[in-house]
Image (cartoon, rainbow, N blue to C red):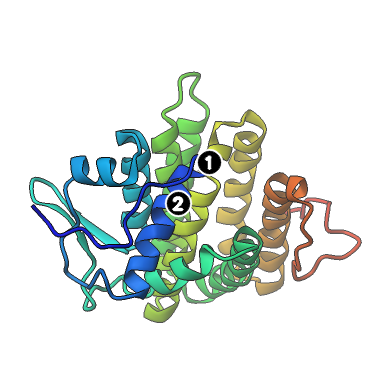
Amino acid sequence: MTNTPNSFKSVKRGGIVDDIIEIIKQALITDELKPGQRLPSEMELMEQFGVSRNSLREAIKMLDALGVVDVRRGDGTYIASESSSRNLRPLIFAMLLKTNATKDLVELRTLTEVGYCQLAGSNGTEEDFKMIESAATAWEAEALKEERDYDLLIQLDLQFHQSIIRATHNELVILLADTVEEMFFHTVRDAHTQDEVIRFGVEGHRKIAEVLKTRDSDRIRDVVTYSLKYWRDQFLKKKNTSLNIPGNGADGDRSPELD
């Protein structure tokens, strides 16, 4: 039986998944959990937190995506090693649990996505652009099905953005942008069940894939910024938050045209 940190306690009824993540975060901050340490078994954690298996697994899935834990099939779940190539993610993970985390994440994504798309337009090869177009086509094929696999749709959307990130050929940009994109898609995963969002995504992916091939930095900025503004309107208007979106001028609501 694995030793359970003293800070592990029953969670409050409410945002159960967030509460589980917060407890584990606090255990990391206070050094009750250390890199490489094995977490208690699933049954022990369910009993300790007083939560269902589904809630616990969702929290662990999010922590795994953030690089905070390492899930090893047949062996258990471990706190990620300090030497992990994903060690940037726990730093951002801690930031995301603060107030206004969604607002901060969308603003951060705005800065990174516009930048990495412009860099991909500059540094990308013809082979890169083919890979980006292929990723857009794969996402569109799943999006247009009557019976969609929404988990697959999210994964294909993330792969589209990652194909652009790879086209920057800049290892630091790849590390940072990959991290931001993964966390963003976990934050807005429910949006992929909305028909309106999917229709916009089909058009948006096509336009981004096309404009990258022009290598025109200004046009790339305009197309990507338009897409980002749509996400802002969809996911933050009901939160009554104000976002600072670069280039948010009078023409911000008109889709950029591709010649």
Residue 60, numbered circle = none
Examine the rendering and report whether any part of residue 130 can be seen: no
The residue positioned farthest toward the top in the image shown:
146
Q: Tell which of 193 and 13 is nearer to you.
A: 13
Q: Secondary structure at mark 2?
A: helix
Q: Is residue 81 left or right of residue 140?
A: left
| x, y percent for residue 203 | 64, 42
Q: Secondary structure at mark 1?
A: loop
* Identity of the residue drawn at 42% across and 47% down: 11
Query: In the picture shown, does residue 240 fall above or below 219?
Result: above
Amino acid on which the number 2 mark rests in the picture: Asp
Residue at the disc numbered 2: 19
| x, y percent for residue 68 | 32, 64
Query: In the picture shown, does residue 20 fall above or below 91?
Result: above
Q: Are marks 1 and 2 in contact (CB under 8 Å)?
A: yes
**Mark 1 vs mark 2, CA separation in Å:** 8 Å
Numbered label tally: 2
Amino acid on which the number 1 mark rests in the picture: Gly
Residue at the disc numbered 1: 14
Among the 4 quarters of the image, the one containing residue 152: top left
Tell me if mark 2 has few (under 14), some (14-19) or many (20+) residues whose alpha carbon lies within 10 angstroms of its own: some
Q: Which one is earlier in the sequence, the residue at label 1 or at label 2?
A: 1
Tell me if mark 1 has few (under 14), some (14-19) or many (20+) residues whose alpha carbon lies within 10 angstroms of its own: few
* Identity of the residue drawn at 72% across and 49% down: 230
Q: Quadrant of the C terminus?
A: bottom right
